[in-house]
Image: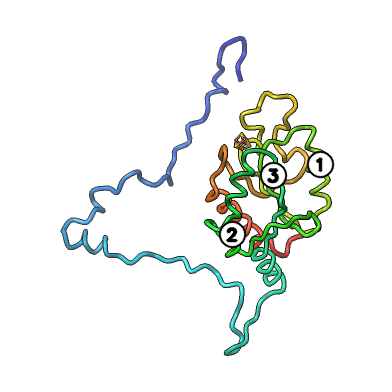
Amino acid sequence: MEVSGEVTEEAAPAQTPVEDAPPAVVPPSERPETGREREQLLLTPVEVDHGKAVYREALPGILQIPADAALALARKSSLWPMQFGLACCAIEMIATYMSHYDLDRFGIFPQASPRQSDVMIIAGTVTKKMAPAVKLLYEQMPNPKWVISMGACATNGGPYTRYDRVLQGVDKIIPVDVYVPGCPPRPEALIDGFIALQHKIMEERGKG
Ligand code: SF4
């Protein structure tokens, strides 16, 4: 607590010793001494994380899978984003849909109507004039639905941080699931955003 510019004894933060902090370097006593030991260390097999299967083989040829996992797998493998762009980020989004990046391999097909879409990509600057239209399109999408905020403008106003007529983040009017950074993000970054969304769909299966 600071009183009249003086710092009392209570204000001094207690020095808690960090006992469990890992050592920054391997201590000399634990380093391999001989060349053979060093080689053994280098040739240690990589630990592979095989993940956890969502299904169980009950009998040969018969798989058991929870219904929520089956639904989540279907949803994440058939994301249909709405054809909708707002500014320069939309050009990168359109490039991502082209054959070079081949989004079809993820089951991602752009749709021309909000009523057949389950993903909205906010690709560009959201002005306060456009914001009500964005909100209306979101409301017209059926559930379940997700939103990707693509680029700095959609996330927090980007270069237009001090512009009164620009919404400082689309999450002020609709919920956002994935934020893709960049100005503009490259197609690889948007694909990364889709993969993050697929992970989120699997993680949140069965909730709500
Ligand atoms: S983030 Fe950059 S590229 Fe994207 S809409 Fe804004 S100014 Fe344009």
Q: Which quadrant: the C terminus?
A: bottom right
- Residue 203 percent coordinates (x, y): 64, 60
Report the residue at 66% width, 48% height from top: 148
The mark found on residue 23 in the picture is none
Q: Earlier in the sequence, mark 2 or mark 1?
A: 2
Q: Residue furthest bottom?
A: 60
* Foreground pick, 193 / 70: 193
Classify mark 2: residues with Cα within 10 Å, few (<14), some (14-19) or many (20+): some
Quarter holding residue 62: bottom right
Disc 3 residue type (three-letter): Gly
Disc 1 from disc 3: Cα separation: 12 Å
Q: Earlier in the sequence, mark 1 or mark 3?
A: 3
Residue 133: which numbered mark, if any?
1
Dividing the picture into quadrants, the one containing residue 88 is: top right
Give the number of the mark in front: 1 or 3: 3
Q: Secondary structure at mark 1?
A: helix
Q: Residues within 10 Å of mark 3 (few under 14, many from 20)?
A: some
Viewer-nearest residue: 52 or 23: 52
Q: Nearer the viewer, residue 59 or 188?
A: 188
Q: Secondary structure at mark 3?
A: loop
Image quarter in which the N terminus is found: top right
Residue name at image x 61 percent, y 59 percent: 199
Q: Where does label 2 land, which residue? A: 103
Give percent across and percent down for residue 204: 68, 60
| Residue under numbered circle 3 | 85
| Image x and y of residue 187, in percent | 55, 49
